[in-house]
Amino acid sequence: MRVLFIVFLSINGFLNIKAQNDLAPNDLIKSYGIIESTASLSDENAILKVGVNAKNTSHCIFDKNENIIEYKGYDVYGELYDISFYVYETENNLIEKIKLDPINSIVYRTFYVYDVKGDMVESYYHIKGELAYRGTYKYNDKGNKIEDLQFTGNSSVPSEKWTCKYDYVGNVIEEALDYAESYKRHYVYDSKRNIIEFSEVGNDGSNRDYKFKETFKYKFDKKGNIIEKITYIYGNLGYLQSFSSDGLGSSILEQWNYFDDQVVKSYTTRYTYNKKGNIVRTNIYTFDNKVILSKSYDYMGNMIEYKWYSSNQSVTTRSTKYIYDEKENWTKKINYEDDIIQKIQIRKIDYFD
């Protein structure tokens, strides 16, 4: 079995382990391969040493399907503080996760059960050998989840209940959560499967009084693009958003708020695109046409500049410089605030043949 070994170093808080497809867009790699290592520095000339420049070090082992099977985390002194193992039934179905402390005692253990279709139908979460939580899940004949029940310990009464209903083509038409912060949502679609109305009703979990109710209505052009969105609050007009194009490569979003019988313009957002249709700039203006926020993007779609204008028009600028390899994946990322380096990330990628 082919195993991938990956090392992560970071000086900006503890590592968040994510599946490959859960990474942020600018963290994904475009060719078949795996990120072999990443390092975060506060100084471009810093030497990476555990306990000196690195806040923590983590070692991960992946199987041939790029599923994580082992994780070890070390503190700033190089001491092991976290161990996790993952077991899979098939290529991607996780059936067991075990978390250990530094002396190899089990902290918690989670088991997952699947049906013959590969859908998860049960989960069990044990803390120090005792069942703490369990979940059961149901699906319709099209594989859409219709029920999620969560139980505390061995209780037969669910502490949390989520249900969902679909139309004949698989669109969600009703979704409900019965918990401390409960809600019920309804969705209405047009013939092209665009959402044209959305409403949500919530309650505070005690007296079941409505806490809020919002309804959304949409209008589309002949190409299916949204041109208008109206928000109603408790059945009354809340605000209206219109979407248009200037014909010069920019799309425009304008919002009006409704106060009693008055309609007040709130803000305008202008999105500018290049010839390939990729966004290159976003500007947000106040009702009197003053810029309050500006964002710029490079040809890869990564944000490279962020400017925030305060009420007195002072400007805070945050920018990012990317360096890409021949496969258009970034290998170096430098973050600045008002032209001062805040963080440098260097990434090594191992491409598969």
Image: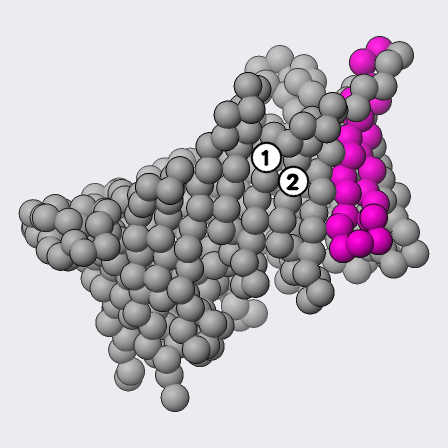
> Does 188 sit left or right of 27 as displayed?
right
- In the figure, 110 relative to 7: above or below? above
Picture residue at 59% right of the left edge, 35% below the top? 293
Label 1 Cα crowd, 10 Å radius (few <14 / some 14-19 / many 20+): some
Q: Is residue 59 magenta?
A: no
In the picture, the quarter occupied by the N terminus is bottom left
In the picture, the quarter occupied by the C terminus is bottom left
Separation of residues labelled 1 and 2 (CA atoms): 6 Å
Give percent across and percent down for residue 6.
25, 68
Disc 1 residue type?
Leu
Disc 2 residue type?
Asn
Picture residue at 29% right of the left edge, 82% below the top? 2
**Main structural element of the magenta stretch: helix, strand or loop?**
strand
Can you see residue 129?
A: no
Label 2's element?
A: strand
How is the rendered protein coloured?
one colour
Label 1's element?
A: strand
Camera-nearest residue between 155 and 346? 346
Picture residue at 48% right of the left edge, 40% below the top? 150
Which image quadrant is residue 45 in?
Answer: bottom left
Q: Is residue 246 magenta?
A: yes
Mark drawn on residue 283: 2
Does the CB distance between marks 1 and 2 fall below 8 Å? yes
Label 2 Cα crowd, 10 Å radius (few <14 / some 14-19 / many 20+): some
Picture residue at 70% right of the left edge, 47% below the top? 271
Give percent across and percent down for residue 335.
37, 48
Of all residues shown, which one is farthest toward the bottom? 353
- Range drawn in magenta: 237-260
Can you see residue 304?
A: yes
Camera-nearest residue between 306 and 204? 306
Mark drawn on residue 293: 1
> Does 113 sit left or right of 188 as displayed?
left
